[in-house]
Amino acid sequence: MLDAATAPHAGHPPLLARPHVGLAAQYAGTVPHPRRPAGPHPAHRSAPVRAPRHPRAACTAAAAAAGAGGELATRFAHRLVEVLTGLRPAGQLQRHTTLDGYGQLTALVRSGPLRRCTGSARARLGRVHDSAPSADVLEACVRVEFGPRHHMVAFRLERHRRTDLWQCSAIEAH
């Protein structure tokens, strides 16, 4: 048996002898915390609804999809241009396109409007311009530069009804 001198907390009374309120009682709400106001945590209180500060913040779900879809359109545009210039095989985009979209893609790869000439500069993509005609559709276009020459690539992404994934349904390149 340990005496008071050899106890881990020498000079202090045992834990059970201390007058305190258990943590479970504090969290149960029976004893208020001495430094916290009573009531729900400030983060859990409902914030007052404010008017939008920027005109775009008040847009519909379709415009919100366009803002979120901007990154999606940019990533797809990079991969699409790599396929059209011959840096990536067309089969890598097969699961990201509908049947009609994949047919258009393979036809563009065969006709080669963006095929690089030997010694030609590497393709540079401009800013991707996108718009959302509806919440499940995203249309985008991008300018592709090969040195002094440039081409335009446009595509349409649609959200699949059952899988909720985005797929390319139409592609044009000039």
Image (cartoon, rainbow, N blue to C red):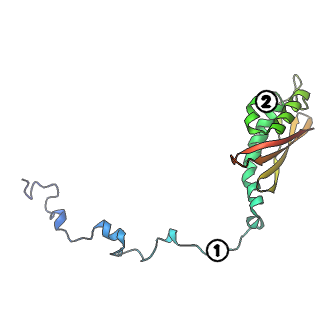
The answer to which quarter of the image holds residue 87 is top right
The C terminus, quarter of image: top right
Residue reaching furthest to the front: 162
Element at label 2 = helix
Left or right: 164 with respect to 10? Answer: right
- Nearest the viewer among 89 and 9 is 89
Reply above or below: 143 against 40.
Answer: above
Reply above or below: 65 against 34.
Answer: above
- Nearest the viewer among 49 and 147 is 49
Residue reaching furthest to the top: 118
Q: Position of residue 42 (x, y in %)?
A: 50, 71
Q: Position of residue 11 (x, y in %)?
A: 13, 62
Residue designated by label 1: 49
The answer to which quarter of the image holds residue 4 is bottom left
Calculate the distance from the C-alpha at mark 2 to the C-alpha at mark 1.
Answer: 48 Å
Q: Amino acid at mark 2?
A: Ala
Total numbered badges shown on the rendered structure: 2
Q: Earlier in the sequence, mark 2 or mark 1?
A: 1
- Nearest the viewer among 128 and 160 is 160
Residue designated by label 2: 90
Q: Position of residue 131 (x, y in %)?
A: 82, 53
Element at label 1 = loop
Reply above or below: 62 against 44.
Answer: above
